[in-house]
Image: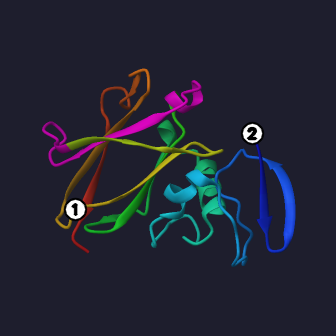
Amino acid sequence: MLRSCRNIAITCRFVLLFPVIKKRGASNTKFADNSKEVLKLASRSNFGSHDMSAYRLKDMHDADYPGGVVVDPVPITAGEEIVVFYNGLLAQSGADGVYLHCGYGNADNWQGVQDMRMAKTGYGFIKTLRTPEVSTRLNFCFRDTAYNWDNNNGRNWSFEIHNG
């Protein structure tokens, strides 16, 4: 899809492969409509500065973690925002939409289970969420719009959330 953008007095045409168009140090940068999710990146990161969204996503993608899943930042602190990046089986199979299926608590008895649509980027899918204010476990897996699941070979993904 072709879009026009105005970025610091320069007009350009480009193929929209990635929802965030940002230059380092640019203060008047335009973003694609679906970039709101990507811009809500957590303020603490293991993958570069939180204000360089495109670079951070590329680093998360290039980390090539098992299953194509990156959670950032880790360790996870109660009450903080985290980013879940997914470029696993469903994404690589051509899924047009992916949902983060997540809940909290014991890995065998999830509480507060919800499906959250992830934003599609040129590197994979991404979702930003705020963790509960108490220490617990974050448990999740993924599904596509056709209800195909990636549950880490039946193990799901599980991360401890600590109190600072």
Q: Quadrant of the C terminus?
A: bottom left
Q: How is the image coloured?
A: rainbow
Q: In whole angstroms, how far apart are the C-alphas of marks 1 and 2? A: 38 Å
Q: Which residue range is magenta in the image?
A: 90-112
Image point (29%, 43%), residue name: 102
For label 1, the SS is loop
- Answer with left or right where residue 65 lies relative to residue 153: right
The x and y percentages for residue 93 are 57, 24
- Answer with left or right where residue 141 lies relative to residue 110: right
Q: Which residue is mark 2?
A: 1
105 in relation to 56, above or below: above
Which disc number belongs to residue 72?
A: none
Q: Residues within 10 Å of mark 2 (few under 14, many from 20)?
A: few
Which disc number belongs to residue 132?
A: 1
Amino acid type at circle 1 is Pro
The x and y percentages for residue 19 are 64, 52
Q: Residues within 10 Å of mark 1 (few under 14, many from 20)?
A: some
Image point (69%, 79%), residue name: 27
For label 2, the SS is loop
Q: Quadrant of residue 142?
A: top left
Amino acid type at circle 2 is Met
Camera-side mark, 1 or 2: 2
Instruction: Choose the circle earlier in sequence order: 1 or 2.
Output: 2
The x and y percentages for residue 41 are 49, 64
Q: Quadrant of the N terminus?
A: top right
Q: Decide which of 46, 86 is in the foreground and name it.
A: 86
Q: Is residue 16 magenta?
A: no
Image point (40%, 37%), residue name: 99
Q: Is residue 94 magenta?
A: yes
The x and y percentages for residue 161 are 25, 60
